Amino acid sequence: MTDSTLQSQVSLSFNRGTLLLTGLDRGQLPTEPDGPVWMWDARVGAWRCDAIHYASARTILGRRFGSRFHDAVLVPDHVGWAKTDLPAPRPEQQEALDAWLRGGRRGQVIMPTGTGKTEVAFAVMAETKVATLIVAPVRDLMYQWHRRILATFGYDAGIVGDNLFNIKPVTVTTYDSAYIHMGEMGAGFGLLIFDEEHHLPGKCRREAAILSTAPMRLGLTATPERSDDLHKDLDWLIGPVLYRMPFREAKGSTLADFDVVRIPVALNDREQATYDECSRMLRHFIASRRKELPGYSWQDLCKESGKDPRARHAQRAYYLKQSIEDRAAEKLRVLEDIFRLHYGQQTLIFAGSNAMAIEVSKRFLVPTILSHTRKRERLAVLDAFTKGQITVLVANRVLDEGVDVPEAKVAVVIGGQGSTRQATQRLGRVLRRSGRIRATLYEVVCEDTKEVERSRKRRRTDAYERTRHYRV
Amino acid sequence: MLTSEHAIIEYRAGRATPDRLTQNAHRHYVDYAERMLAIYQEGAGRQRRWLHRDIEAVFADEPDCPVRRIQAFCKLLDDASTFQSDPSGKSAKLRLDVFSRAARLHPLVCQPDRLFEHEEQASKTQIAEELGTPWDQIEQALYADVMAFQTLEGFAGYPNAAAFLSRYNVAQLQAALYRAESMTVTAGEDLKTIVRYAKFARLLHEIARAGISTYRIRFTGPASVVRETRRYGVNFARFLPALLACKGWKMEATLQTPWKARAKLVVSADDGFTSHLPPAQEFDSALEESFAKKFGPARDGWQLIREGRILCDRQKTFIPDFTFRHEDGTEVLLEIVGFWTPEYLAGKRETLHQFRRERILLAVPQRSLREGAAIGENIVTYKTAIQIPPLMEALEAARSKRPAVASQ
């Protein structure tokens, strides 16, 4: 090391989602065994590492270079809340907050839907008083956070997403927007909150965590597990699990009891005829292919559909079958019965597709919340539903997670997927604590088709334990 | 541009081949393309979902046509179209109105009884009367803002069937680049344009000499040095049309395959992809062209070499517009400054400092000097075009001077 390099400044800055360390030559490694992995970037003549390592990099460099070290990374703003309108935390919410504070302010809190994850996040924000970015799965939830921050702190948060780009010390965004913009906005936040954190570990979306310098991180979910096991990466993307409230504890205490009622419907003659015709065609095609290729599968069929019109017709037959199941006319008749039975009660309907949601809406003249529903209409519909001015709301998958729909006592699933997470999240909607009326979840499924199979799979999950199952 | 859901890529032996319609294998697609364009040209007032269904029907009996190709055609046609967008939210207002009226009548039943007396059709007729519009019109308008139900207003189209198909080919190439981690371009002639447009696409580059007048440029993004990422795939895709408009290049991109392996995508100027941008010379400065003509190939012992050399040091690349070589071997580089914002000139000054070992002349528009942005010596000023006499003077002055020696 020469004299001049000894005296020169070692400067750390944020550069499009990474940290740049200037003032050291290629031969002068900033690496330490327990520190971040720095890479020499010959393109710019500096050391580089991912922004997620900011907290440890700052500590290590400060220790090693003392006054020579200059930290040029944007310092997060202090946020003085105009008001803090938080109800006294329930015991489990207090436990979650304490665990997060004790655990180095970097980690995950796992609580069932309806037990106040948002309140825990607000308690954390009230405590940290620092520039915060909240990442939510979909636009609805992003706007919901915006609304609730305004109600709780009197703070009009910035929004990044839904064609808006308005960064403020406290900003809400979606996972997709965070992935796109984190390279630009990754510095300047002290705290990241990942709502429904199981969305984060995807190959691209994880970059929202990697490209940010925020030292404090909070992940919230009811269902951390992913079938691809990637949730293990949350341990370093966010931090370890610091608090976990078992689902069983929640039931009966803060959540309402509920029944699950499965209503099998039959296809009408016309639907059944088309359905059978499609099945026959599909079976024939696969059988004929299997004569030549014994292991011929659905995947093979999809691959062939680009080369063989017969395969493409078979593929179309399959989708037509699905759509017949999804939109069976009988489901509308059953819905009418449910409306009669639960007259005057707030009822949520989950459709398996946009098309079915719109069909229900046009039949009964009840409002929908779909992925493309704009902010103003969304708010108006949710508001009318909350006030009881309308009693029925149809949604596609948008309301699957976390969107507050208070006081719905009846939910009807008419199509959808059989995955564990969807079942838990959807149940959570009906189960929000309110009064003593038992909630009811109806599953309207086509008989003797694959939908029945999916319903069985749904019922096996933890969320459905200790509920009453019966057929009507 | 397409999305990655439209991409059709074949991976074989470490090579990635995006879907491409060729004259030999897909001659009959010209007919399909004409029919597709006709569907949209005659489709004003029709809903998006019916247009898409008709496009699908064009290929009903075509053996060679993956579903994604059809969807990609729809996307490219939609991209050149305007659909009724309902910006004032008329449908949304109508919905709120109709649904709040219907809430009083809920539930609308098929078989009225004493408890539930609001029959579906009668109730709808009643609401229609309240609103003063026939019910089937209301039902039409109720969800007219949903993508699938939007109606076509206009179709800007493509010049002809061949242009549409070649846009498809480029779009598939771009969609393949969404998977790219890095891109290496070997180029000579149009290098300056290539680097400039890569910068517009926010890519970082490393340049190495590959031959007498060819260079190899590796394009990546900031985080690429830390880990392999597809983050800059969109930037590569955006940059591609500019590259395709250039001449004499070869490109090799490293893609991530869906099976977490790597595959190479190799394309060159000889592959005949057509950019929708004009050729490189046309969108590059016209000033340079006119000057080269005026100077001629040689004058007073100086020979003019267009874009002969490139200077590079880290992210600073200096690609002079002209190189002048004197008979005695002295080389002077000339850069024509077209823009003249103070920031731009400050950047130029920095570049000159970085390359102070070279003899560099700047041609600066006179206006910028009056702005008070002095940028040191070795300046030739011009009003509308560079004049030869002051340039020759400056060239001789530069030749007589020894270039600055690095001070460190």
Image: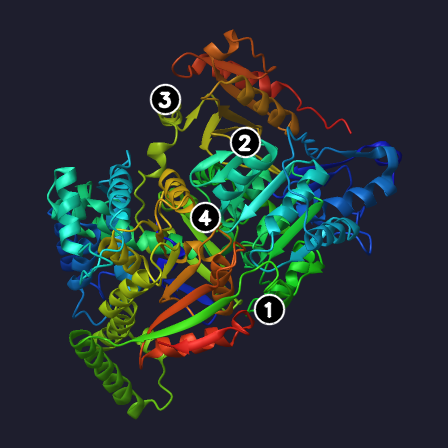
Q: Which one is nearer the viewer's eye here, A164 or A435?
A: A435
The residue where tag 1 is placed is: A229
Disc 1 versus disc 4: distance between alpha carbons? 28 Å
Label 1 or label 2, whichever comes before in sequence order:
2
Q: Does residue B218 appear anywhere in the picture? A: no
Q: Does residue A112 appear anywhere in the picture? A: yes
Q: Amino acid at mark 1?
A: Asp
Residue at (59, 66) in percent of width and height? A225
The residue where tag 2 is placed is: A156
The residue where tag 4 is placed is: B234
The residue where tag 3 is placed is: B294
Judge the density around disc 4: few (<14), some (14-19), many (≥20) Cα neighbours within 10 Å.
some
Q: Chain of mark 2?
A: A
Q: Is residue B341 above or below residue A145?
A: above
Tell us which disc is closer to us: 2 or 3.
Answer: 2
Q: Amino acid at mark 4?
A: Val
Judge the density around disc 2: few (<14), some (14-19), many (≥20) Cα neighbours within 10 Å.
some
The secondary element bearing badge 4 is classed as helix
The secondary element bearing badge 3 is classed as helix
Q: Chain of mark 1?
A: A
Residue at (28, 35) in percent of width and height? B87
Q: Chain of mark 3?
A: B
Label 4 or label 3, whichever comes before in sequence order:
4
